[in-house]
Image (cartoon, rainbow, N blue to C red):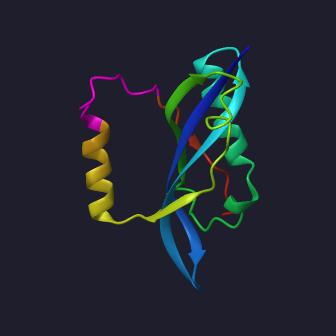
Amino acid sequence: MGKYRVLIAGENLLLDFEGRPQKLGFYVSRTVDAPNYEGAESAAVDLIREDSRLEGLLNEIDDPPVLYAEEVKEIEASDTEQNTNTGFSWFPIDKANQDMRQQIFRSNVLGVPLVHRVCLQLTTDH
């Protein structure tokens, strides 16, 4: 069993933000114990799906929010800096952001393969 640092991205979350519905995205990282990269990705996404800050989603069933692991990195268990979970870093979703993010995802400027992305729908009350 290894220790992994997973950067999770969330997109298309319709939430009540400052009194009005707004589409938001976020980044957050989680440290998990898992047998491999795929297990780490799944465990981290599950932790975020269960987070109370994502309750109250306003998305319609045909416009679901999406979570995926953007980066998975195996770390040393003794590396306390890498073992710290971060808070949510929120950003507004608009057409410009979506276009820019799609270009970033399609380009692999660092020559590092992008992590296998598993898109998981969050359940909504609608």
58 versus 103 height, above or below? below
User: What kind of secondary structure does the magenta stretch mostly adopt?
Assistant: loop
Residue 108 on the magenta segment? yes
Residue 17 on the magenta segment? no
Q: Position of residue 76 (x, y in %)?
A: 65, 21
Please count the marks in the image: 0
118 sits left or right of 53 in the view: left
> Quarter of the image holding residue 39?
top right
Quadrant of image for the N terminus:
top right
35 versus 99 height, above or below? above
Magenta span: 106-116
Please tell me which residue is depicted at 52% across the width and 32% down the height of the picture.
118
Please tell me which residue is depicted at 56% across the width and 63% down the height of the picture.
60
58 sits left or right of 43 in the view: left
Q: Residue furthest bottom?
A: 19
Please tell me which residue is depicted at 28% across the width and 42% down the height of the picture.
104
Q: Position of residue 18 (x, y in %)?
A: 57, 83
Residue nearest the viewer, comparing 71 with 21: 71
Quadrant of image for the C terminus:
bottom right
Q: Position of residue 75 (x, y in %)?
A: 61, 23
Residue nearest the viewer, comparing 98 with 6: 6
Q: Position of residue 97 (x, y in %)?
A: 32, 59
34 versus 32 height, above or below? above
Please tell me which residue is depicted at 58% across the width and 19% down the height of the picture.
37
> Quarter of the image holding residue 111?
top left
